[in-house]
Structures are given as C-alpha cells and as structure tokens.
Image (spheres, rainbow, N blue to C red):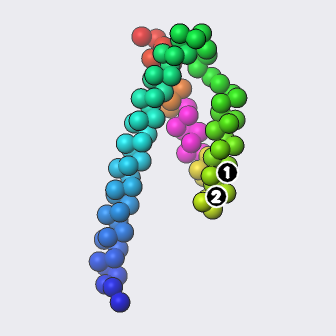
Amino acid sequence: MEDPKKRLREIRKEIDKIDEELVYLIAKRIEYGKEIAHLKRVLGYPVEDEKREMEIREKIFNLCKKYNLDFQVVWSIIKILIEYSKRVQREELKK
C-alpha cells in the first residue's frame, strides 16, 4: 500500500496544477471578453446579452449533469466569471 502522506502530497501537487490551469483559463476568458467588447462596439450591441447568458446557463446545467456536479455551486462560479467579464467589457468600452 502506498504511503498516505506521499499520496496526499501527490494529489495536492495535481490540485496545484489544476488551480494554475484554472487561473490561466480565466485570464484567457477575460482576454476574449475584451475582444468581444470591441466587437460589440463595432456592431452597436450592449454589454448585457440575456439570451447568451441563458445559453451559457443551459450549457453549464448539462455539463453539470454529465459530470455529476452540483449545478448551483458551479453556476455561482460561472456567474461570477460572467459579471467579471461584463465589468471588463464596460471598462474596455470606456477607452
């Protein structure tokens, strides 16, 4: 049997890698949000897009079912990312 302390360290290292990937992906998502802001300006679209947010919500709901995750928890995280993205878009549009 593997040493539990060693296994704990290994798992924590893997979680650290996942955390780094998550932060990288959040940064990438925000960069795309900046680009979207410029495209919305050209197209005359508002920052808020309820239809798109509903599409995202449905997609996340289905992914949560697929991966057996608590939708409310995951959706609360995604909503934070959406609000962050909208804030960044508004800031970009002020430039």
Residue 62: which disc?
A: 1
Residue 81 magenta: yes
Where does the magenta region start and end?
76-83
- Among all residues in the image, which is located at the extreme bottom? 1
Residue 79 magenta: yes
Identify which amino acid the numbered label 1 is placed on: Asn
Please name the residue that numbered disc 2 is placed on: 66
Point 38% across, 49% down: residue: 21
Point 55% across, 45% down: residue: 77
Residue 74: which disc?
A: none
How many C-alpha atoms fall within 10 Å of the one at disc 1: few (<14), some, or many (≥20)?
some
Tell me: residue 4, above or below residue 41: below
Tell me: residue 94, above or below residue 8: above
Tell me: residue 27, above or below residue 40: below
Point 38% across, 61% down: residue: 15
Q: Secondary structure at mark 2?
A: helix
Point 69% across, 28% down: residue: 50
| Labels in figure, total | 2
Where does residue 29 sit, x and y in percent of width and height?
Answer: 46, 35
Identify which amino acid the numbered label 2 is placed on: Lys
